[in-house]
Structures are given as structure tokens and as C-alpha cells.
Amino acid sequence: MTATLRVEGISKAFGGVHALTECTLTARSGEITGLIGPNGSGKTTLFNIATGYERPDSGRVFLGDREITGASPQRVFGYGVGRTFQLTRIFPRLTVLENMLVPAQHGAGKNGAAGNGGRGRAHRHLRERALELLAFTGIAGHAEALAGTLSYGQRKLLELSYVLIAEPQVVLLDEPAGGVNPSLVNHLAERISELNKQGRTFLVVEHNMEFVMSLCHQVTVLDYGTVIATGSPAQVRDDQRVLDAYLGSGTGDG
């Protein structure tokens, strides 16, 4: 079910601004990897390159043994890399359950295809699976509600749920705890940890240090588009370069 996601020697410039320089990162199969750094350090750009929303100027991206450098977001998703976004991307005028069926009905993941004779069975299976995932994330009680009525934290849970319906090998989470109340942050961490114990691989961008350090097996730190440290949470926490570059700075998008 799982695979290692690797970005090797990735560089990306926007005009004269070097967003990333020779960045290498590995999200190891079956682990939760954190990606942290101060504002503008290149974290979201790296996410966008890994998932096909940006093309690198140089470097390569691999999912297991498959090179996926420059593939479209739809193709990357089909290969088994799901992601959430810092600002949630849901369909507010659809119900929560209808939101869940969108990625599956567009052919993503194992559940996307069904022959003509099996469309009814496939739809019932997808609906059952969607309800199972909504129950797992704790929002099944909102299945028939319009997604636009959910709280921000519940929208984060919905986005995670509909990424999971495609059964991705690797899940990239962009600030999953950002703007979420503490009780839902804890609930989200528990769900991620449980999915990881089932074998799911995660790469997580997050500014909430407690969330990252308690959840991740390893952490990579970016500063000015360059990897300055990779190691266990304890190693990264005590690294003077990290203390200088990140922990003393403010938080925000990056």
C-alpha cells in the first residue's frame, strides 16, 4: 500500500528569486515525515513540485521506483500521491457526502473505475467507503449537510477524508493544524497516527511545533530554500541552525 516519496536535488526560481536550491528530501515508506521552516523557506513550493502543481528547474521526484517529475497533478494523484492544501479546497454547495464522491468519480485511485455492468455496485461501494471514512474522521454526522456549513477544523477533516477515499500510497498535508481549535488538532493527530500505524506514509508541512515533534518520525528543515537539517524530532529540536533559522522567527505561509 505504501511507497517512499523522494525529491532529489530540486531547484526552482521565480524570476530572480530562488525558492529552492538543490533540495533533497525523503518521506520514507510507512513513516510520518515533517517539513518545517520559517516564512518563505520554500515548503509549499516543494509540495507543489512533488504533486505536479509546479515544475522544477532541475532535480527529480520519485514515488518508489517510478519517476513522477513534471507529471500533471491528476496523474500524480492517480499514481498514489494525495494532498491537502493550506487553504481547504472543498465544494461548499455540495453536501459533505457528495464532496467525498468527487475524487472517486473522476477515476482516482483503486475505486475510480467501474465497468458498465457494475456501476450501481461501484456507486454503493463508494458511498459505503465514504461513510466509513467520515466516521473515522469524526464527521459522519454531517454527511448530508452542505460542506460550506462546516467549521474550519471540520473542513480540514473533510479534505483529509476525501483524499483518503482514493487510497493514496503517500499523503501530503499542508498545515493540517493551521487555524484549527486545539481539540480538533488533537483529534486530527490521532487520526493521522492511526492511519500511519495501518501503513500509510505522510509528509506534513506544519508550523505547530508540538504537533510536528510529537507526531513525526523524522523532520526536514528548510531555510531560504535550502535543507539545513534532517533527523529525528529530538535531533532537529537541538540543532543550533534550526534554532537560529526557525524557532526564533514568526509563523505563517511558506
Image: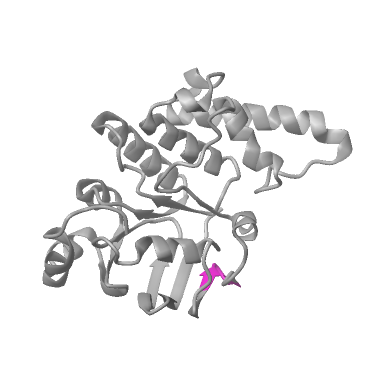
Secondary structure mostly taken by the magenta-highlighted segment of the chain: strand
User: Is residue 28 among what the camera can see?
Assistant: no
Residue at position x 38%, y 32% in the image: 152
Residue at position x 57%, y 25% in the image: 95
Residue 14, image x, y percentages: 42, 73
Residue 65 counted in the magenta span: yes
Residue 54, image x, y percentages: 51, 66
Residue 90, image x, y percentages: 52, 37
Q: Is residue 82 above or below residue 228?
A: above
Q: Determine the image quadrant of residue 179.
A: top left
Q: Quadrant of the C terminus?
A: bottom left
Residue 90 counted in the magenta span: no
Please give left or right for residue 35 compared with residue 235 in the image: right
Residue 44, image x, y percentages: 39, 60
Q: Determine the image quadrant of residue 52.
A: bottom right
Residue at position x 49%, y 20% in the image: 142
Q: Is residue 164 above or below residue 67?
A: above
Please give left or right for residue 30 compared with residue 74 in the image: left
Specify the segment rendered in magenta.
61-66
Residue at position x 55%, y 38% in the image: 162
User: Is residue 191 among what the camera can see?
Assistant: yes
Q: Name the foreground residue: 93 vs 156.
A: 93
Please give left or right for residue 181 compared with residue 163 in the image: left
